[in-house]
Amino acid sequence: MSAPLDLLEADSDRLLVAVTRLLTEKGILSHADIAEQIASSDAANPALGAAMVARAWTDPDYRALMLRDGTAAAEAMGIAMHGKPPLGVLENTADTHHLVCCTLCSCYPKAILGYPPFWFKSAAFRTRAVRDPRGVLADWGTVLPDSVKLRVVDSTADYRRMVLPLRPAGTEGWDAARLAALVREGDMIGVTIPSA
Amino acid sequence: MIAPGTEVKVKLDWPELRGPCHIRTPHYLRGAKGVVERHLGRFANPEDLAFMRPAAILNLYHVRFAVAELWPDGHANDSVVVELFEPWLETA
Amino acid sequence: METTSPPRAHHDMGGISKFMCETVDIAPHELTDFDRQVDAIRSLLGGKGLMSADHLRRGIEAIPEETYHRLSYYQRWMRSIVDQVITAGVITEAELRAALEQG
């Protein structure tokens, strides 16, 4: 049994109003619940991930934790992960660079980075990431030497993934806060590389 | 359990031909050869969860494929690493 | 190993020729109130055990190809939410029709 086509094809805005009204009238959710959920989702943003990255760059034990158990590493930074999909962290090295994608839909580490950006969900990104990842990186002006291995990680199942980028040169002695300010959303998906 | 380092082949199967389904094995991997990198844990089969059917708990693996083997224009140093459920993987 | 034959579901987009020549639009695009509300409702339904990510994906994948590409990301979600809440009996067809008529 599936919903009838005429209902599925009704105007999206009208469907949202109607479904919201029915769910609230039935006591399944309240307007306060909706507002609270929106606020919670809005609060997640790339700065959370940047803080994790900066801490990993300055604290070897935390780095090891992040690579071994991303979920625990997020929780250690105060990010609530209960009921959320497990987090997998991909380590960039001098000879290996990672790119995260989801060709089937748009699985993204929302709890750590916030809502996925438009480009991550786009047909062009989802299609090209697994077949021409260097071409995709070029859309951001990012160029990897041919000798660097590029691993594209297609999020097809239960994990959500982020990249632990290489710490940029010229940042010796910087504290975590200063380092975190260098780390952008794209760096943690692998389309860009942070620099000082 | 499939050990890390084991060469596998993704089943050349198309459930899409047999009716409504929910498959998390991308089309571009059907019939492709790869290497298991690690066991990721055990998770309920999304193919059944999606239709509110009882779902078996299955082994999930990270499997690596060379992009150059998937497409003729692939870069020699690029690979794709994908989470795949055990029933989709054939060992020699 | 791209296949040009029908077995590929249209949401299964890795490496397909259709979009290989398209540049990624890297500009930021703000979420609308509609987007945020749809996202929130799905999360809340998920928390109540009424609609999981698996249900969401299945409903999106069931959208016919032309419609799939025409709808925005969160319009696809809205359609999937309707599909799931009716299929699971959370809301009846009659109730939804009546609510739509009320406007």
Image (cartoon, rainbow, N blue to C red):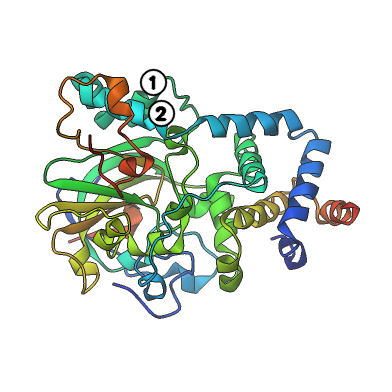
The residue positioned 39% from the left and 69% from the top of the image is C22
User: Which comes sooner in the sequence, label 2 or label 1?
Assistant: 2
Q: Which mark is residue A108?
A: none
| Residue C76, picture quadrant | bottom right
Residue A30 seen by the camera: no
- Badge 1 crowding class, 10 Å Cα cut-off, few under 14, some 14 to 19, many 20 or more, is few
Q: Is residue A119 visible?
A: yes
The residue tagged 2 is A48
**Quadrant holding the N terminus of chain A:** bottom right
Q: Chain of mark 2?
A: A
Dot in front, 2 or 1: 2
User: Picture coordinates of residue A157 (x, y %)?
Assistant: 40, 48
The residue that mark 1 highlights is A77
Q: Residues within 10 Å of mark 2 (few under 14, many from 20)?
A: some
In the rendered image, which quarter is residue B79 located in?
Answer: bottom left
Q: Is residue A135 left or right of residue A76?
A: left
Residue located farthest toward the bottom when viewing the structure as drawn = C5
Along the viewing direction, whichever of A174 and A85 lies nearer the viewer = A174
Q: Amino acid at mark 1?
A: Met
Q: Is residue C74 above or below residue A81?
A: below
Q: Chain of mark 1?
A: A
Where residue A173 sits: x, y (%)?
A: 17, 19
Q: Position of residue A159 (x, y in %)?
A: 38, 41
Q: CA distance from mark 2 to mark 1?
A: 8 Å
Instruction: Determine whether label 2 and label 1 are within 8 Å by CB.
Output: yes
Q: Amino acid at mark 2?
A: Leu
Residue depicted at 63% across the width and 47% down the height: C32
Instruction: Name the image quarter holding residue C47.
Output: top right
